[in-house]
Image (cartoon, rainbow, N blue to C red):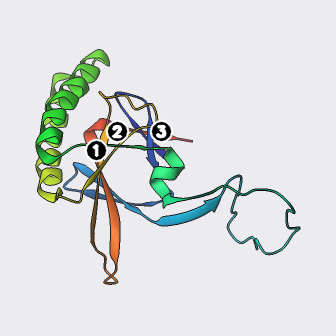
Amino acid sequence: MLVYRDSVSGDEMFTDTVKVNVVENSVYEVTCKYVTRREGEIVLAGSNPAEGEADEGTEEHVESGLDVVLNQRLQETSFDKAGYKLYLKTYTKALQDKWKELEYPAEKIAELKSQCMTGVKYILGKIDKDSQYYLGESMNPDGCVAVLTYRDGADGNEEAIMMFLKAGLDEEKC
């Protein structure tokens, strides 16, 4: 399994257990699904939850939401498009500082900066009044803020798409 972590905060933003598309080699578009779960429930592929004993007399805590948000414990935050643009300046600066700290060669940094600019333009073009914004679990204000939008899917139904700057995430094998 691949885990995608924010380069700045180290927060887990998503995994490859969900549908991931790379757009213009600069943005990860992650398709989110709405789910409802009971606390402590673990669903294994191929298992039949109807089999087994039912709990008697216990209170159930049920949570509903988008799988990526629930799985990675992403935290919703408030932005408008103008505020998000300002945030992007700070975030891309933090990324550049991180790349220098990691001693990336100048050519690699230039490539990542170009990738960032392409990604920023793409994401800003997709933001609308209904877009939502999510920080990682640590709620580090300098970390990645993912943008959630809704659009028509291939099947004609609305689907939730969360966008992340590719240059701001590190892939980790687990």
Q: Residue at x 30, y 40 (%)?
A: 145
- Is residue 108 at least partly visible in the picture? no
The answer to whether 83 appears left or right of 163 in the picture is: left
The answer to whether 101 appears left or right of 35 in the picture is: left
**Residue 156 placement (x, y as % from top left):** 31, 84
Badge 3 or badge 1: first in the primary sequence: 1
The front one of 87 and 76 is 76
Indicate which disc residue 172 carries. 3
Real-space CA distance between mark 3 and mark 1, rounded to the nearest whole angstrom: 13 Å
* Above or below, 64 relative to 172: below
- Is residue 135 at least partly visible in the picture? yes
Q: Mark 2: which amino acid? A: Leu
Q: What residue is shown with label 2?
A: 169
Q: Are marks 2 and 1 in contact (CB under 8 Å)?
A: yes
* Above or below, 108 relative to 103: below
SS at badge 3: strand
Please rate how many residues cluster around mark 3, counting C-alpha atoms within 10 Å: few if below 14, some from 14 to 19, many from 20: few
SS at badge 1: helix
> Which quadrant of the figure has residue 91?
top left
Number of numbered labels in the structure image:
3
Please rate how many residues cluster around mark 1, counting C-alpha atoms within 10 Å: few if below 14, some from 14 to 19, many from 20: many
Q: What residue is shown with label 1?
A: 166
**Residue 119 placement (x, y as % from top left):** 17, 47
**Residue 129 placement (x, y as % from top left):** 17, 58
> Which quadrant of the figure has residue 52?
bottom right
SS at badge 2: strand
Real-space CA distance between mark 3 and mark 2, rounded to the nearest whole angstrom: 10 Å
Q: Which one is closest to the eye, mark 3 or mark 2? A: 2
Q: Mark 3: which amino acid? A: Glu
